[in-house]
Amino acid sequence: MNHNKNIILLLGGGLAAMPALASETQKPNILYIMCDDMGYGDLGCYGQPYISTPNIDSLAAQGMRFTQAYAGSPVSAPSRASFMTGQHSGHCEVRGNKEYWRDVPMVRYGQNEDFSLVGQHPYDSAHVVLPEIFKDRGYTTGMFGKWAGGYEGSRSVPETRGIDEFFGYICQFQAHLYYPNFLNRYSKSAGDTATVRVVMEQNIQHPMYGPEYRNREQYSADLIHQEAMKWIDSQTADKPFFGILTYTLPHAELVQPEDSIVNHYRDKFTTDLDWEGSIWSRYNPSFHTHAQFAGMITRLDAYVGEIMALLKKKGLDDNTIVIFTSDNGPHEEGGADPTFFGRDGKLRGLKRQIHEGGIRVPFIVRWDGKIAPGSVQELPIAFYDLMPTFAEIIGVEQFPGKYANTDKEVDHFDGISFAPTLLGKNQERKHDFLYWEFDETDQIGVRKGDWKLIVKSGIPHLYNLADDIHEDRDIASSHPDIVREMTDIILREHTPNPHFHVTLPNNQGNSVVE
């Protein structure tokens, strides 16, 4: 792509001049670390009593911890799409975990047999995504972990969307196994022209399911982290970098290498549970499920510690913004036990639900010398705010209009920059409301101030988060005016999408089939 240096985008809030925070010679690096299915209360700095997370807790102590940060969706692919596109799920092309399997000849991989191209619904190729913006501003870009922005061979894969280096899972469905048959790689520096499969030969020697599965040797989370560390280690101070580290931990399946991390928790949880699996499950059986889950989070915490140590060793830590978050709320799959860990942080709901527990996530930002250490922020933000926030930070001076001098005919963005909040300044522009929709459970959500409306199969339910954070008391019947006001937001914000459908309410509180 021949991108013009003057990026111009359109915000849902209209024209907004944005002062550049970064000079051309000293743009900050950004590392965005997004884990998978970690609940709001799964970290020590968010009140978790059982799981050790010293490195992430240290990140919070050195930076800003948000208490009202929201994912883009209660599941993986659309939540990541909201982050990548700056759109909420009423506007974004990707609104669910829609899967694709397409049998094609295995020509690219040098084999004379058919195989399945797999992955999720692709991002709209006419809508700009974050790596493209960073590439336009002179950044080196890398992504390690889940892609989930298009199936193999689709219009939206890392090499077509501004990514210089990728290693991980193109298909998030494949990421349900930590000892997979293959991972995917794209390396511009190595001369790759397309994303290829990296076959895990040692793993293929043993079955994918059953007792011998545990004889597989190559643990994907470790492999992905090692590649991310190599990429970070290759960065220098004279060229800024943007890294997206979408680790799969602590998503089920609950399995990891037999080492001191998991054994520590086996000794700690002496009455632990086993999960035998079922013929209907995509997961292998798991033993000592509490120890496995806690160990996966502590393993992730160790990754974060290694990243921070490497940045410091290279002298890059003072000019690198590090963000840590989760893609959605906690799961209860593959033997996971949210009740034991109190993982919803006193919030109702889990993954796939638009209740607070499904979408409110941990969110920590460290920027040495810029963000006040140990600060706690109650400003409500959502993943779609990251695009304008990053744009302001890296010096995109104007953020309305059309993506300049490209084929990107973009039409809408929903985020608001919270860079002023990060820098301790007055946050003049704030959201009037936040919005979510999710077709797989037929739910729509709107938060406006302390009011929270959740529409389930067209039926509205109203809560006041100020005195009912657990969303136990549905007060829709006693506040019809609020219901109508928030229903009007839904009818205005939702745009039809042929691939994803929800049942809309009407402004009288009744359901309307889309």
Image (cartoon, grey):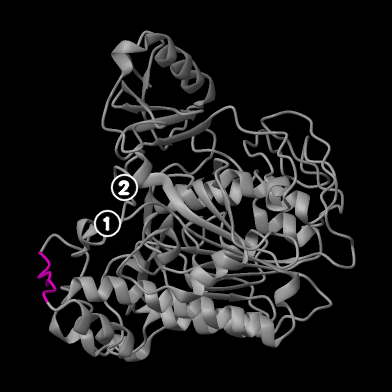
Residue located at (69% from left, 59% from top): 371
Please give the label number shown on residue 136: none
Q: Is residue 252 left or right of residue 482?
A: left
Where residue 63 appears, as percent x and y from the top left, is 62, 63
Q: Is residue 125 visible?
A: no
What range of the chain is rendered magenta?
271-278
Q: Is residue 319 visible?
A: yes
Q: Is 288 in front, or is 514?
A: 288
| Above/below status of 143 relative to 410 | below
Q: Is residue 317 magenta?
A: no
Mark 2 and mark 1 residues within 8 Å of each other at the beta carbon: yes
The amino acid type of the residue labelled 2 equals: Lys
The amino acid type of the residue labelled 1 equals: Gly
Helix, strand or loop under label 1: loop
Q: Is residue 339 left or right of residue 498?
A: left
| Above/below status of 470 relative to 386 | above
Q: Is residue 213 left or right of residue 431?
A: left
The residue wearing badge 1 is 342
Q: Is 266 in front, or is 354?
A: 266
The residue wearing badge 2 is 346
Which picture quadrant has residue 479? top left
Where residue 154 appears, as percent x and y from the top left, is 52, 56
Helix, strand or loop under label 2: loop
Q: Is 269 in front, or is 417?
A: 269
| Above/below status of 423 relative to 139 | above
Residue located at (60% from left, 78% from top): 308
Q: How many labels sit on residues? A: 2
